[in-house]
Amino acid sequence: MSTLTQTPGADHARGDRPLLVRLGVVLAAYLVAGAGAGVLWERLWEPPAGLTYQGRWFLEPAGPDVSFASIALFVVIAFPLGLGLALAAGTRRGDELATVVAVLLAAVVAAVVMYAVGRALGPGDPQALAAGEPDYTPISGELGLTAPDPERVGWHSTALLAFPAGAMTGLVISYLLITRRFAARPRG
């Protein structure tokens, strides 16, 4: 008698629940990993030294290799983390398209979270700090994904794509190389 009282969409709603839980777990895992990666990025990064002169901050010694360290470290942390999480997400078969979309969106959000957490934990903007300081005052540089030039915006960097690129690479490896199971096809 209980089957007669159920609504027609009840079975469909129950069937979507495991998929929604799985996608929620993927998103939560990427968010937590992004926050943890931001903390790790800030902890492993060594701020470049600089000096103030006439109310502005300058790298000392100047050079692209000094300012590139934070970008390289971001990529070295984000790419393998995105890859590993995607390998874990891709091992479960079924609803691959939903998994791909969820992993891609979660990886983009995780990259932004990683950047925001690392930047929030790092030192402040040296240009702003240099404004009120006397000449030749040592000030550390800030954690960012671009060169520390005053006209640059800190988050305009292709390094933010390292997390999603690692995630998509992980899904490709997972779907094509690791867990691919060839189904027996009827011949005839």
Image (tube, rainbow, N blue to C red):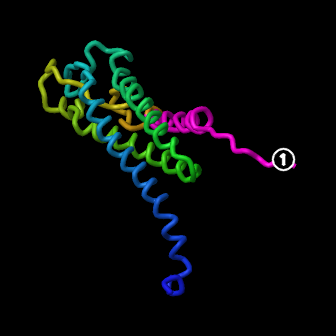
**Camera-side residue of 5 and 170:** 5
Residue with the mark numbered 1: 187
Asked if 82 appears above or below 71 in the picture, the reply is below
Amino acid tagged 1: Arg
Residue 18's x, y, as percent? Answer: 46, 59
**Camera-side residue of 130 and 145:** 145
Q: Residue at x 26, y 20 (%)?
A: 48
Decide if residue 187 is on the left or right side of residue 6: right
One can see residue 33 in this view: yes
**Camera-side residue of 122 and 64:** 122
Asked if 161 appears above or below 24 in the picture, the reply is above
Residue 19's x, y, as percent? Answer: 49, 58
Does the magenta portion include 116? no
Q: Callout 1: helix, strand or loop?
A: loop
Residue sticking out furthest to the right: 188
Residue sticking out furthest to the left: 134
Q: Residue at x 57, y 51 (%)?
A: 94
- Magenta part, dominant SS: helix
Residue sticking out furthest to the top: 61
Q: Quadrant of residue 147?
A: top left
Q: Residue at x 40, y 51 (%)?
A: 25
Q: Residue at x 27, y 19 (%)?
A: 59
Residue 50's x, y, as percent? Answer: 22, 20
Q: Residues within 10 Å of mark 1 (few under 14, many from 20)?
A: few
User: What span is in magenta?
Assistant: 160-188
Residue 53's x, y, as percent? Answer: 20, 21
Decide if residue 57 is on the left or right side of residue 87: left
Does the magenta portion include 164? yes
